[in-house]
Structure formats: C-alpha cells, structure tokens
Amino acid sequence: MKRKVRLNPTAIGKLSATLAILTALNHIAVSRLFCDYEYTKEEILEKPEPAAIDRFVTPSCKPHPSHCEGLCSTVSTFVQEERKLYLTTKDSWGAYYKSVHEYYRCVNARIIVEVGIAYGSQTAYHLKHGRDFIKEYHVVDPFLAGYDKGDATSRKFQEAAPGVSPKDISLAWFQGIGFDIGSNGMYVPGNETSKIHPAPGCRLRMHHVTSVEGAKLFGDHSVDAVFIDGLHTYEGVLDDIYAWMSKIKVGGSLIFNDFNKINFGVNKAVWEVVEKHNLNLKMIDETNAVLSSDNCAKGLMPKKFKSSRLRRTINH
C-alpha cells in the first residue's frame, strides 16, 4: 500500500512563495524585492511575501486644485514659461520626449511613474499623446529648492519666487502644476492647439513626496514603467533603484535619464546594479537608459564611465 503524504498548508504556502520569488529574481522588475540593498539573496528568501491586498495597487485619484492664486499663481506663471522653453527649444529636454513616448507605446505602458518632473513638460507631453493607452500617469516630486547645489534645476526652484521660503515655493509649485495640467490641461502657454483635451483629471496622479517615500505608496508589481529623473548623485540613484525595483511588473521597465552625462552619478549607480545582478541594460536614445527584458529599446550600446559626483547627499 502506498503511503499518502500530507503537506502542511503553511509549508505549501512557503514553498509557493519561495518558487515565486526565485522565478521573479530572473526578471529585472523584481530582481530585488526589498529596498534595503544590503540583503543577500538568501536573506530575501527568508522574508515573507507582501500581503496580497498590498500587491498590484497604485495610489487612488485625488482631486486637482480648482484654483491657483497668490504665490501659486506667481510660481505657476514661472513654471509655464520654463515649460514652454523646454518644449520649443531644439536640443533641450523635449528632444527625447518622442523617443521615450514611442518606447512607452511599444511596451504598452499603461501605468507610468515619473520621478522628478521639474516643470511638468514631459508629463504634459505623455498625457497629451498617450490618451489612447496611458491609464495612470503618476508624478513623484517634493519640488525642493537647494536639494543639490550642483544641479541647475535645484537652483531654478528658488528663482520662481526670490525671498520666499523653499517650503512655501514647494507647495505652490505642486499646487500650480496640479491646477495647470491636471485641471486645465495646459500644455504650452498661448498655444491652444497644444492643450490637452480633455484635461487629464484622474489620469494624472500627483504625489508631493520624495522618491523613496513615494515608492512606499505603490504595491509591488503595480507599475509598467518608472522614469527616474530625481537626484542625479550616485547615492540618490541607488536609493531610487532599490526603492522602485519591486514596484514594477515582471517584464516592466526602469528608465534612467541623463545616463550618459559624466558629471552625474547616474551611470556609475546603474552599472553597479547591472553587474551585481546580471541585468539587461539598453539605450532608448542618447540620453535615457532602460533596465528591461523587452525588445523596444534599440538605441546605442550603453557607455560606462566613472562619475566625479559621488559625495554623500540627502534623499530626494
């Protein structure tokens, strides 16, 4: 007589969780399931799976401001003019929006997170041109002045309202973009044909927090693509990678802006993670690198060089 083997339900659960993690570790999206990158693979496997209710969930929609007056109006006017500059000047940030957008379309990125949006020019571009496939476009940015003295955008925040505290500027900047883009669908000032119709509403979801804190608002495997354009130091980029890696779906994408700029720490941080975990790195264009397993990025081979900006910095 054959002996029947009974498996403890708890043991089955642990075995299933372990197999799931081992499978997932072969994908870029979840090659690290936890933000603390000092954990070894063995230590990760000992950690419990996140509760099912927390997985695949993105932050809910919140109403955008219905008006923008006083300091909000002052800062918003400044932001609109800067946005117009970047969208209409050749060789500015706007030069790569099309290639990134084509990549999003190729991978069918329906839920996107943009970390660090500055004036919201890229945000507006994707919301306008991706109405047929982008379901949720989340932006994560504390809009802080002086976060990095070596970064020109950091200095620009204070120019919006000289003499006003960085905290007040930060709040006004956040409210202004929410009103300008989320409620009104503004794109380029004075150009009605470029306005977003209808206004994005709940397609745009804004989070006035740092990158690392913002990642905590998302369930694991809930996002198709994360565009990382926050603090450009080596430490800052590493924090971003390990904060967001578990948030993208299996087969999803982590995109890094300014990858090929030698005066930033982006290149060094990304290559360190790629080599440590044997990940697949490609270029979308000359500026943006992506960690992903898809075939939609067909740019140049990624360069590798050392960065001179490796100083210790604050989290963004």
Image (cartoon, rainbow, N blue to C red):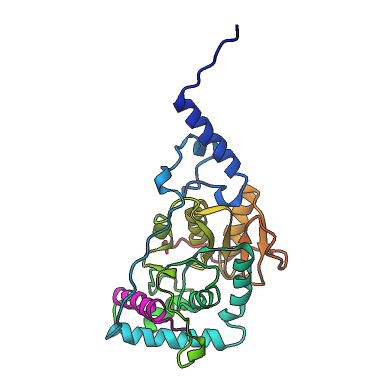
Q: Residue furthest bottom?
A: 190
Whether residue 162 is visible: no
In this view of the protein, can residue 271 be seen by the observer?
yes
Task: Estimate the x, y position of residue 312 in percent, counting from the top left.
Answer: 46, 60
Q: How many marks?
A: 0
Indicate whether 170 appears above or below 7: below
Question: Residue 77 in the image: x percent, y percent?
Answer: 38, 88
Residue 245 colored in magenta in the image: no
Q: Is residue 70 above or below residue 298?
A: below
* Residue farthest toward the top in the current orientation of the protein: 1
The part of the chain drawn in magenta is 167-187
Q: Position of residue 300 (x, y in %)?
A: 72, 68
Residue 90 relative to residue 13: left or right: right
Q: Is residue 116 above or below residue 55?
A: below
Query: For the C terminus, which image quadrant?
Result: bottom left
The answer to whether 277 appears left or right of 118 in the picture is right
Q: Which quarter of the figure has residue 161?
A: bottom left
Magenta stretch mostly in which secondary structure?
A: helix
Q: Position of residue 137 (x, y in %)?
A: 47, 67
Please give the name of the residue rendered at 45% of the width and 90% of the height, measured from the top-left corner: 189
Q: Is residue 185 magenta?
A: yes
In the foreground, 122 or 12: 12
Task: Pick the quarter of the image with the N terminus.
Answer: top right
Q: Nearer the viewer, residue 149 or 220?
A: 220
